[in-house]
Amino acid sequence: MKAVNIRIASSAFLAVVLLAALGIEAVAIAASWGVRYWLVGGVAAVVVGGLALARHRHPRWTAVTALVVAGLTIAAARVFNLPTEPGPAMALALAVLVGSAVRTQPVRPAGGIAAGGLAVVVGAFLAARPHSSGASAAVALNIASYLGGVTIGLALRLLDERSAVATARVRQDERLELARELHDVVAHHIAGMLIQAQATHVLARRDPGRVGESLSGIEASAAEALRAMRRVVGVLRDDDDPPATSAGPEGLGDLVERFNRQGPPVVLHAGGADAAWPPEVSSTVYRIVRESLTNVARHAPHAGDVRVVVGEGPDGVTVEVADDAAHGPAPESRGGYGLVGMRERVESLGGTLHAGPRAEAGWSVRATLPVSRSS
């Protein structure tokens, strides 16, 4: 939703800038050449501007179409002795289209569109009449717009790639952490099965009547190990702070007490917490609370009220961490890659996570994790 709002705001801002450039250009040409000499260039500028506003749906083809329109306009201006094209409005729209394509498209299409933009700039330079009014200024504006669009597009592409690499690294770390937890859980159950199997041999000799009871225990341990593997191993297909030795309700109490000594006061409500939750659910709840409280200490140190609510309902285990600090950093800076890691872990276990500013004040992180109980 936030991305959509940003896109709408940026398109509205671009529309205002393009209308202003069209107005200035129309006034300037009317005062020097006359309005009728700008009919072709004006219509072409409006078309290219419209393509720039629609670039999000088809960034590649809007850019290609705009470059073709620009090339035809340059040719028409030369043949019919019209003002030098592209003018300021079209140059701005072309810069936006080329820069957007350079940022979002694969390497070859992006390079082809950048080359097409360069061809338009060179064509404008070659077609401009040396003694035409404003020709040198129009060519210089085209060169500057093109270079600016390509430079910004490349810079944003690099930032996007770095962000994608960092996000992938965080997600991989979460998957490895879950794999380690899977190993610990399964190893615990298998060790118990081994001990029970050894005891069964002894019972078979001393008390054969109790062999069935021992075998039932082995069966229960095997079933629980199998359930744990099924819950976690799917993650493997596709912080420096190690997990707590006790990630259940008692571990949350220790965690909150530790944060109370170094940050805003935290109140824990864990009346519905259950120590019998599967280990990966308990550890995920712990990680969510720890990461959220770390973000509160980092970004909202002046919060007056921080609440941690953990419980179990019809949809599964729920955990929410909320503070009352004034709205500050944007969601990306508030959550950072820790939020990416939390979301990866929660969704890997079949749950949901929502993070964002609260309506009244402050920030909230809320997660729901399904829990399967053994029958």
Image (spheres, helix red, strand yellow):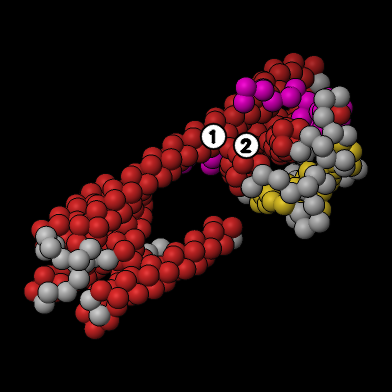
| Magenta stretch contains residue 64 | no
* Residue 260 visible to the viewer: yes
Q: Which residues are magenta?
A: 233-259
The secondary element bearing badge 2 is classed as helix
The secondary element bearing badge 1 is classed as helix
| Magenta stretch contains residue 241 | yes
Q: Quadrant of the N terminus?
A: bottom right
Residue 294 falls in image quadrant: top right
Mark 2, residues whose alpha carbon is within 10 Å: few (<14), some, or many (≥20)?
many
Residue 75 as seen in the image, left or right of residue 266? left
Question: Residue at the location (49% across, 61% down)?
Answer: 10
Which mark is on residue 338? 2
Residue 57 as seen in the image, left or right of residue 4? left
Q: Compared with residue 206, is residue 327 higher up or lower down, i.e. above or below?
A: below
Question: Residue at the location (87% across, 36% down)?
Answer: 266
Mark closer to the chain start, 2 or 1: 1
Q: CA distance from mark 2 to mark 1?
A: 8 Å
* Residue 372 visible to the viewer: no
| Residue that label 1 marks | 170
Q: Position of residue 109 (x, y in %)?
A: 24, 53
Residue 240 as seen in the image, left or right of residue 156? right
Q: Amino acid at mark 2?
A: Gly
Residue 76 falls in image quadrant: bottom left
Q: Are marks 2 and 1 in contact (CB under 8 Å)?
A: yes
